[in-house]
Amino acid sequence: MAGIDKKNFDDPDEVEDYGAEGNSKRVTLGIADDSTLWRSSLLPGWSWMRNIKPNVSFETCPLHHREYVVSGRIRYTMNDGSEVVGEPGDHLLIEPGHLAEVAGNEACILLDW
């Protein structure tokens, strides 16, 4: 079908596995990576320091994120110490220089693009 591209998170292009703390799945549409979407399923105990930092050389996340919180809660702490907790229905714009962690005892489902 011309003009439409479709993918499903049941068959992602990439998976980042966080073991007992969940995963992030990526699907990309378009010939030149025109549209990339991540769906993260992060369980209580997941944090950037625990699950990402051991595999990178950065002290805090160097990426820019646009996120939508589907369920659960996630806390972002910026390098300057300011904090925001994302909750279901929140759309967040997060600049580089932050840490993240699941807040509370419920899994956090995020869409990130």
Image: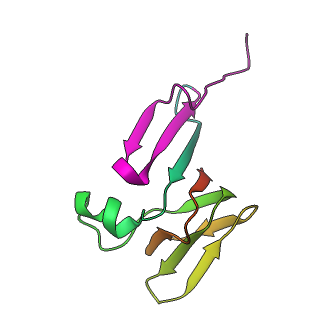
Q: Position of residue 83 (x, y in %)?
A: 56, 83
The residue positioned farthest toward the front in the image shown: 105
Residue drawn at point x = 50 percent, y = 30 percent: 12
| Foreground residue among 73 and 44 | 44
Magenta-highlighted residues: 1-30
| Foreground residue among 4 and 10 | 10
Q: Position of residue 33 (x, y in %)?
A: 53, 34
Residue drawn at point x = 59 percent, y = 36 percent: 34
For this view, does 55 lie left or right of residue 5? left
Image quadrant where residue 90 sits? bottom right
Residue drawn at point x = 50 percent, y = 38 percent: 26
For this view, does 88 lie left or right of residue 21? right
Q: Is residue 96 visible?
A: no
Image quadrant where residue 70 sits? bottom right
For this view, does 111 lie left or right of residue 16? right
From the image, which quarter does the N terminus lie in?
top right
The structure's colour scheme is rainbow
Q: Is residue 26 visible?
A: yes
Q: Position of residue 42 (x, y in %)?
A: 50, 55
Q: How many marks?
A: 0
Q: Position of residue 82 (x, y in %)?
A: 54, 88
The correct choice, above or below, for 67 with respect to 31 in the image is below
Asked whether residue 3 is drawn in magenta, I would say yes
| Foreground residue among 59 and 69 | 69
The correct choice, above or below, for 37 with respect to 91 in the image is above
For this view, does 107 lie left or right of residue 60? right
The residue positioned farthest toward the top in the image shown: 1
| Foreground residue among 77 and 106 | 106
Asked whether residue 107 is drawn in magenta, I would say no
Residue drawn at point x = 66 percent, y = 23 percent: 6
